Amino acid sequence: MQRPLTAPLLNPPPTPSPRARAARTALATLTALAALAALSGCGGTAEAARDTRPPTTPTGVTAIAGSATTVHVMWSPATDDRAVTGYTVLQAGRPVKELPGTTLMTDITGLAPGTAHTFTVRARDAAGNRSADSPAVTATTPVATAEDRTLPTRPTALRVTPAGPDAAALSWRPARDDTRVTAYDVYQSGSRIHTVPGTATATRVTGLRPATAYTFTVRARDAAENSSPDSGAVDLTTPGVPGDRPATAPTGVSAKAAKGTLTLTWTPPRTTTGPVKEHELHLNGRFATTIVWGADPGAGPVHYTLTVPATPGVRYVVTLRAKLPDGTWGDFSAPCTVTTV
């Protein structure tokens, strides 16, 4: 059988070099990746990951002049489909404060005395989406009083009552000042959490946790930023929510100072699974010692005497927490303040 004839190639293609082969391979890989990305985009994956929805507009915005140069601005939280990461406070449309998403109040300082100031608040999320501005609120700073160095008197007869598991109602008798009281500041364990006008003698504090111990005080303030001494401290434990775990904080904490000692008294938390035989004591926010009873100390109150340096005038903030029968630590008690003698 005769074989078919094959014409010889006149100009055979050159054999590609290793570098050229690598370049072709890389180009093919990039082309495939680009095609895959285009297909993913068509499928909606990139579109779904893009956050284009702005947070809701902050509500409940209030502005209260606390002095001749300061206005306290507060608002209720905005919401977002993912998370609110920050707030912007604007004065007459101009941003003056940038705050994290966990902050719902701030002081605007350096203002002109005897002037009406207008404020709005907007929310933002992690993608940079911003809400619409809240409705504007106005506060008028009082006229400055020259060389006013007289403190207001302390508010008296502070009363605190539960207003549900997450709120408290406060009332007090008014303070006095040589000019006038412009604001009252509410403190919770030494941190200011709320401000009301100087004409108010009652307010409501929200955002508390159920079955939790709190300590409240109130200070008066005048137009020259002079603040009164603290009112008497009042403790409150918010009621629990049905179905939640029971309160685990020690209650009724008190302290009495003597030369070189502090005698503490408190009632351990109640449990249904066994006695509480161990407590942890903290002074000024730091661990001080562990108090252990060898036997059931009973329903309380219980007592413990702690040795401290015999230096008069030293202020201690005392908190306690109990080791529960299951081995976990309960909530901290409301702080108790004592000064050495």
Image (cartoon, rainbow, N blue to C red):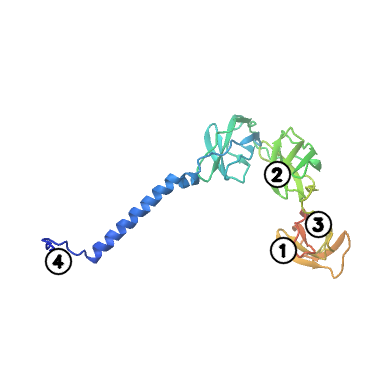
Which mark is first along the chain, 2 or 3? 2
307 on left or right of 23: right
Q: Position of residue 281 (x, y in %)?
A: 76, 62
Contact between marks 4 and 2 (CB within 8 A): the answer is no
Q: Nearer the viewer, residue 334 or 27?
A: 27
Q: Position of residue 293 (x, y in %)?
A: 84, 68
Q: CA distance from mark 3 to mark 1?
A: 16 Å
Q: Position of residue 164 (x, y in %)?
A: 78, 42
Q: Say what secondary structure mark 3 lies in.
A: loop
Task: Tell me if mark 2 has few (under 14), some (14-19) or many (20+) residues whose alpha carbon lies within 10 angstroms of its own.
Answer: few
Name the residue type under label 1: Phe
Contact between marks 4 and 3 (CB within 8 A): the answer is no
Point out the residue furthest to the bottom here: 294
Numbered mark located on residue 207 in the image: 2
Residue at the location (14% across, 66% down)? 3
Q: CA distance from mark 3 to mark 2?
A: 22 Å
Point out the residue furthest to the left here: 10
Which mark is first along the chain, 3 or 4? 4
28 on left or right of 85: left
Numbered mark located on residue 3 in the image: 4
Task: Name the residue tied to disc 3.
Answer: 250
Which mark is first along the chain, 1 or 3? 3
